Image (cartoon, coloured by chain):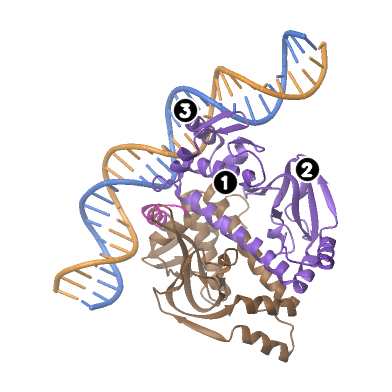
Chain colours: A purple, B brown, C orange, D blue
Amino acid sequence: MPIGLDKADMQKLDEVVATRRQVKQGELLFRSGEEFKSLFAIRTGFFKTSVATPDGLEQVMGFQMAGEIIGLDGIVTDHYSCNAVALEDADVCVMPFSNVEELSREFPVLQRHVHKVMSREIVRENSMMMMIGNMRSEERLAVFLLNLVQRLYARGFSQSEIILRMSREDIASYLGMKLETVSRAFTKLSDEGVIEVKQRYVGILDLQALKKIVNPRACD
Amino acid sequence: MPIGLDKADMQKLDEVVATRRQVKQGELLFRSGEEFKSLFAIRTGFFKTSVATPDGLEQVMGFQMAGEIIGLDGIVTDHYSCNAVALEDADVCVMPFSNVEELSREFPVLQRHVHKVMSREIVRENSMMMMIGNMRSEERLAVFLLNLVQRLYARGFSQSEIILRMSREDIASYLGMKLETVSRAFTKLSDEGVIEVKQRYVGILDLQALKKIVNPRACD
DNA sequence: CGAGACATTGAGTGAACTCAAACGGCGTGG
DNA sequence: CCACGCCGTTTGAGTTCACTCAATGTCTCG
């Protein structure tokens, strides 16, 4: 969280995140339509957010891990617009939004932080739209894996190994494709020697090659 | 903008939006990478926001009209992440973000408003992702037209007629398809008697039918 | 009136979809 | 401890929708 505050201030901020909540795997943190009261900061665990499509299917909006904030979608209508389900046992900080707003007024650094978190989500979704609109199935999967491994790496996990917490169907929904297509894309990347797949384990064998799939020229 | 403030307060708020800026058709309001200083509230005119894809193409992120706010994407990195170009002569309020934040601290109602605007953008993009991921070309076009006509109607324009300010290519990019496919989708809807198309003029002939295309069951 | 940009239409291809079957791990109960 | 059944995943075959490439049509503006 934001830094550069003295001890007394820090204590005040701690009050915002005083409450904790445990969510067991498979349980909902909040559901679509439920009244919005709080944002949640994930301490541990892994979440999936999704909405029901008009025709009764599920559309996955995102996957969230430790350090990320969920519930931002609820602000605009005072009701959450999506479901948040724990894909593994999780522990979250409950941050009543009224507290967040109140303290934001008092601490510009917190205010700025909140704004950045929301802006980041907007930009993230921008790039998702770009990806789904323009990329082919393997490219999407490559982007997905790169993003995941990068976020995990930033949290101290391996740079080259992933244990997926979500099903192929979840991935498919998230990436705008069908589960069979996801499976085929995994197989293809595996056949090419870029990754190694065994069920939900994914090993990155050739990071450069994976990046090259996403952006053929300028493979930084 | 937010209401429920006395006269003196209103004056203070007016200071935020004191500066105006004219943008001629085809001109950029801001460009990707440029330093972020302000949000912009559109007074009149019509904008398109877009980013360049790695392979040099343009991905349209959205279309904005009077009363809407652009520039939110710039907060997170202090640099705009997209280009904003005027599709018709426009007039915007320049709102220096530092002023917005400062006054947000003073006026909770403004603070709440800012948060809602950002949250709305997040939810909007959620539904865009859902649409691009799940719908077929005609459905996407139907959603696009319904959304556009609804926003225009809310601003006092016709409920059944649209003059498109963007090209087929822009629409295609926005909806995650190719311009030829957009054209064919227009033709198809036209052949079905649902809409009437003459270049950039679109007349809605059968609103119910259009809604039904988006959501076959429960055509409210 | 002509040039250029934008839009439509056509034909053929290809990527992702649907439907269907086989496979594999994992947990449960015999 | 092994057999069974279930669920998630993989693989296969055939189809469809949107894409590419190309030509034609139409509007706008100098």
Which residues fall within the magenta stretch? Answer: B176-188
> Residue B104: in sight, yes or no?
yes
Identify the disc placed on residue A191. 3
Discs 2 and 3 carry the same chain letter: yes
Q: Chain of mark 1?
A: A
Secondary structure beneath dot 3 equals helix
For residue B185, which quarter of the picture?
bottom left
User: How dense is the environment of label 1, judged by Cα within 10 Å: few (below 14), some, or many (20 and up)?
Assistant: few
| Prevailing SS of the magenta stretch | helix
For residue A58, which quarter of the picture?
top right
Discs 3 and 1 carry the same chain letter: yes
For residue B182, which quarter of the picture?
bottom left
Q: CA distance from mark 2 to mark 3?
A: 36 Å
Q: CA distance from mark 2 to mark 1?
A: 25 Å
Residue drawn 74% across the image and 50% down it? A42
Q: CA distance from mark 3 to mark 1?
A: 21 Å
Residue type, numbered disc 2? Glu
Image-based side of D5 in relation to A137, left or right: right
Image-based side of A83 in relation to B146, left or right: right
> Residue B213: in sight, yes or no?
no
On the image, the x and y values in percent for residue B216 come to: 57, 50
Residue type, numbered disc 3? Asp
Q: Chain of mark 2?
A: A
Residue type, numbered disc 1? Asn
